[in-house]
Image (cartoon, rainbow, N blue to C red):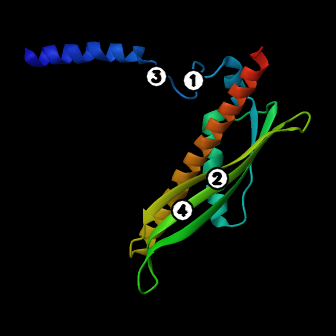
Amino acid sequence: MRNLAILILSALSLGLLTACGFAPVHGGSNLSSNSASALQNITLIVEDGKDANDKEASFHLNQRLRDRIGVNQGAYTLTVSPSWSRGRLGISSDDVASRYDGSLRAKYTLTDTRSGKVMNTGNVTAVSTYGASEDPYAVIASNNNAVRNVAAEAADRIIFKLAGYFAEADLSKTAP
């Protein structure tokens, strides 16, 4: 009987949490309708980069951005240039790294598709630190995982910055 009362009380308390004011970042309630629609009105161009790691990072960054804003032919064009780098950390006396720092720096430019006017530019950086096992395949797997993680983080940061830009631009239009 006590467990049933706890279960019912827990279920009722979940309903109260919906009134806390939490809203998804990409939801229409968090941005004005103009800002939200602007994010869905972006054509995406992600440059490949100069080496295999840049190309892998570009692929994952492209996928994450497309998951967030969709595949569109819009009023704006977002061009992203990612650059992956890996630094050694925790170097032992025999010059072997025990940890690596994987970093993705993405430079982005938002342009008006019709006029070519640059609307917004910026840089985002995402970092993932991972352990270096003695097994070479484990290091490769860890590196691949780090590339995926930093690409997802960089994509989210770009979306946040663009959402802020569109919200600010929308506010400036309605300001007295």
Q: Position of residue 58 (x, y in %)?
A: 66, 54
Q: Nearer the viewer, mark 2 or mark 4?
A: 4
According to the picture, the residue beneath numbered tag 2 turns out to be 59
Residue reaching furthest front? Answer: 176
Q: Position of residue 129 (x, y in %)?
A: 47, 61
The kind of residue on which mark 1 rests is Gly
Seen in the picture, residue 88 relative to 171 is either above or below; the reply is: below
Residue reaching furthest left? Answer: 1
Q: Position of residue 103 (x, y in %)?
A: 57, 60
Indicate the quadrant containing the N terminus: top left, top right, bottom left or bottom right. Answer: top left
Q: Residue at x 14, y 15 (%)?
A: 4
Mark 1: secondary structure: loop
Q: Marks 3/1: CA distance? A: 11 Å
According to the picture, the residue beneath numbered tag 3 turns out to be 22
Compared across the picture, whether 10 is left or right of 19 comes to: left
Q: Quadrant of residue 42?
A: top right
Is residue 70 in sight in this rendering?
no
Tell me the tag on residue 102. 4
The kind of residue on which mark 3 rests is Phe
Q: Nearer the viewer, residue 154 or 143?
A: 154
First in residue order: circle 1 vs circle 4: 1
